[in-house]
């Protein structure tokens, strides 16, 4: 998966570098380069959002398996401070949350979950805050 992200056009173009830490965690970094710089010389907002877009969905998909449907339902990004250098973000869904999703979906067949993260600048300051809403639907009950 990490290799696929390296060759994904929008990520290559914006110099977005994801790293899979473990089954529940992905870290992403993006240096400030010409291809992701806006008119005033800071991180382009679209690139900041792009670096945060798919990772909660991928963590859920990987941990739940192919019998589940996982879709991004909505997203919000709040820009708090200009990104003037490399930025990074960490996406993590705890194993307990994965189990809670499985239990809810087993009972209700679907759920909507919310996840949030901060995009941080080089000195740890919050550059942007991202909120994601994900829709998860489970497999149809198997007929006996």
Image (cartoon, grey):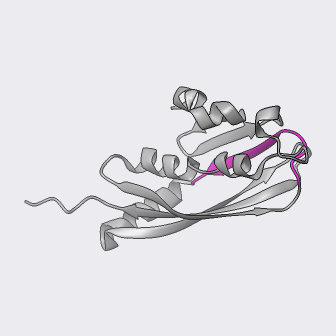
Return the residue found at the far bottom.
108
For image coordinates 88% across by 53% down, the residue present is: 82
Where's residue 32, x and y in %? 83, 37
Examine the image and state in which quarter residue 21 appears. Answer: top right
Horizontal side of residue 20 vs 28, given as left or right: left
- The number of discs equals 0
Locate the C terminus by quadrant.
bottom left
For image coordinates 84% across by 38% down, the residue present is: 86
Horizontal side of residue 128 vs 144, given as left or right: right
Return the residue found at the far front.
39
**Front residue of this view, candidates 99 and 29:** 29
Q: Which residues are magenta?
A: 82-93
Using the image, determine if residue 1 lies above or below residue 77. Answer: above
Where's residue 71, x and y in %? 44, 58
Horizontal side of residue 18 vs 122, given as left or right: left
Using the image, determine if residue 38 lies above or below residue 132. Answer: above
For image coordinates 56% across by 32% down, the residue present is: 8
Horizontal side of residue 101 vs 29, given as left or right: left
Where's residue 54, x and y in %? 56, 48
Where's residue 56, x and y in %? 55, 52
From this viewpoint, is residue 20 visible?
no
Is 83 magenta? The answer is yes
Using the image, determine if residue 110 lies above or below residue 125. Answer: below
From this viewpoint, is residue 70 visible?
yes
Is 85 magenta? The answer is yes
For image coordinates 57% across by 54% down, the residue present is: 94
């Amino acid at each position: 998966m990490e290799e696929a992200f390296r060759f994904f056009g929008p990520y290559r173009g914006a110099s977005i570098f994801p790293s899979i830490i473990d089954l529940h965690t992905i870290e992403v970094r993006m240096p400030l380069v010409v291809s992701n710089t806006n008119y005033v010389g800071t991180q382009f907002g679209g690139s900041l959002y792009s670096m945060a877009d798919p990772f909660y969905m991928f963590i859920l998909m990987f941990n739940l398996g192919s019998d589940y449907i996982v879709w991004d339902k909505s997203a919000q990004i709040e820009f708090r401070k200009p990104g003037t250098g490399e930025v990074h973000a960490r996406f993590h869904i705890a194993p307990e949350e994965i189990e809670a999703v499985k239990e809810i979906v087993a009972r209700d067949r679907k759920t909507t979950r919310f996840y949030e993260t901060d995009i941080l600048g080089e000195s740890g300051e919050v550059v942007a805050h991202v909120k994601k809403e994900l829709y998860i639907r489970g497999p149809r009950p198997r007929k006996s």
